[in-house]
Image (spheres, rainbow, N blue to C red):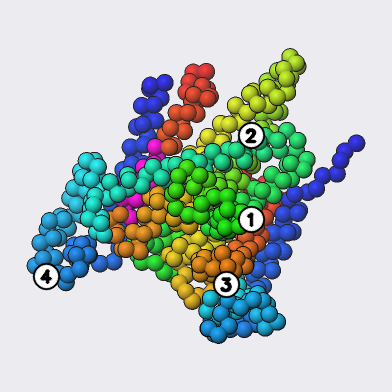
Amino acid sequence: MLKFVLRRLLHTVPVLFGISILSFGLLSIAPGDPAEILLRSGGIQPSEEEIVAVRAEMGLDKPIYVQYGLWLWRLLHLDLGISYSSGRPVISELLDRFPATIALAASAVTILLIIALPLGVASAKYPGSWIDIFGRILTLISASMPGFWIGLLFIYYGAVRLKLFPVTGMDGFSSVWLPALTLGFGMCGTYIRLIRAGMLEALRQSYVRSVRARGIKESVIVGSHALRNAFLPVLTLFGVQCGHLLGGSVVVETIFAWPGIGKYAIDAIFMKDYIVIQGYVLLMALIVVAVNFLVDIGYTLLDPRIRLGKSL
Amino acid sequence: MKRKTISWRAVSLWTGGSLVALAVCVGIFAPYLTPSDPLLINLDIRLSPPSLHYPLGTDQMGRCVLSRLIMGTRTSLFYSMLALGAALSISVPLGLLAGFAGGRTDRFIMRTIDMLLAFPSLILSIAITGLLGPSLANLLLAFVLVWWAGYARIVRGIVMQIKEKDFIMAARSSGGSPTQIVLRHILPNAARPMLVLASLEIGTIMLSISGLSFLGLGSQPPTPEWGVMLNDSRPYMQTIPRLMLYPGLAIMTVTIGFNLLGEGLRKRDRIET
């Protein structure tokens, strides 16, 4: 197992390298000279000498690979630079808002599973029934409804008309549910379909027939034997879709004024705080890599055949 | 006794096809269908309820909502297709090259693709648009820069499958040059699955473009665009909810159309994704 983890860890090295190159290069597409932008953010017109001095201080006069090296060195020391607009380190700005985004994402995944799991299982158990048709329609709607519109509709019906939830912002525990529902609903379609397909496949297997022949209760067969196998592709999908989850949270956080990193990134765009945008993209990519790493490890825990590889 | 089941494939093909055809017609003939000028501001009649002259009422600037929705169909469809077309023009040649040439070329292209795909696509598009400066042109550029990668990988997969077929071997042994084989034998056979898979993407692209426009990163007011219209309607959500209802319904209907059509086509051609 340790060997597998190490080997998998080694696989992430080239990915991390690619991520660092692209994140570093990203800043160069922004218009204007970073030194000048930094000086202007103080509200004064900088002189030519001042710009040259700051350029030297920021290392912008050095060759590009030296700049990359310096940037990477600082990155390894968790230094993502200083935000132009707030004057604080980008890393602490991002980490301050991180818990809010994680809380939102975790609640969204919970809601997602509450919707998708029973519907996916029931659609596979009774294909062609009304619940299967309902699942299909829900899948289509969830894939076709824009997240920002779902959000507005939930605010209107849930908060304005029925007054079930606070409208926006972070005001205690209950305020997470409306944004989480928006995020979770938008993603549940793919999961319903995948769980259904996985269950259909699993219920056809011979081991299901054999436990059924042994007179095991149907609920145990479906809930334990088949579901465990149907869950493997769901785990993979979670790894693949974790980027979508983070992307979707940008929109949802903006609509609900949820104080997470997605909203912070959008605010940074309108304040032309380029270094924050760079830090944000980098952090998101690292999260996706980390989640996929954990998914692969979890996969081997659920299915030992992968861990043991060819020796089986 | 066998119960007659509904053919989902036919249902999705026909429903999706009709919705898409309708949307395309509305998009093409938009200027002839609008009851009034979608950009004409008339503050005297702002936020007025539906009437004979303004079938869906007017918005916060007194502009005709129906006319803006109709013109919005054109904006959304046109820019989604433009983005898809531009992305395809990068991904198809590169995918063909990687899949057919193999070796070092393939590895180089694939490493570039992997690097791009390591980032969540929506977040990378948002960041590129943000760095270039929010505008529709920059948004489209960002989309093309991000989206070609995933599609090029799919094209490569399709090409590698076809490459193993006997008729390619026959073409090779009868002395066909690599260019000839790619253009005359591989491309025509790969075109169909490529187009079907591309049609599955249009819905997603449309949702993303209108989503980013909603955030203020894409189309800018006063362009009649659905995402922008939805964002404009937010201050009036409590008083005049119908303003946010229409653009959302429009986006959803067209996206459902594209999703159903793509899904139907995919099942008909038995293409695995």
The disc, 1 or 3, on the residue closer to the chain's N-terminal end is 3
Which region is colored magenta?
A277-290
Instruction: Please name which of the two marks, 4 or 1, marks the residue nearer to the observer.
Output: 4
Instruction: Please name which of the two marks, 1 or 3, marks the residue nearer to the observer.
Output: 3
Residue for point 75% across, 35% down: A126
Cβ–Cβ below 8 Å for labels 2 and 1? no
Q: Which residue type does callout 2 highlight? A: Gly
Residue B27 drawn at (x, y percent): 62, 73
> In which chain is the residue bearing label 4?
A
Secondary structure category for the residue under label 3: helix
Marker disc for residue B259: 1
Label 2, residues with CA under 10 Å away: few <14, some 14-19, many ≥20? many
Secondary structure category for the residue under label 1: helix
> In which chain is the residue bearing label 3?
B
Distance between mark 4 and mark 1 Cα atoms: 55 Å
> Which residue occupies the foreground of this view, B219 or A307?
B219
Label 4, residues with CA under 10 Å away: few <14, some 14-19, many ≥20? few
* Quadrant of the image containing the N terminus of chain B: top right
Distance between mark 2 and mark 4 Cα atoms: 65 Å
Q: Which residue type does callout 4 highlight? A: Glu
Cβ–Cβ below 8 Å for labels 2 and 4? no
Query: Which residue is under mark 4?
Result: A48
Q: Which residue type does callout 3 highlight? A: Gly
Q: Main secondary structure of the magenta part?
A: helix
Query: Which residue is under mark 2?
Result: A198
Using the rendered image, report if marks 2 and 1 lie on a common chain. Answer: no
> In which chain is the residue bearing label 2?
A
Instruction: Please name which of the two marks, 3 or 2, marks the residue nearer to the observer.
Output: 3
Residue for point 36% across, 47% down: A97
Residue A2 drawn at (x, y percent): 38, 21
Query: Which residue is under mark 3?
Result: B72
Distance between mark 3 and mark 2 Cα atoms: 40 Å
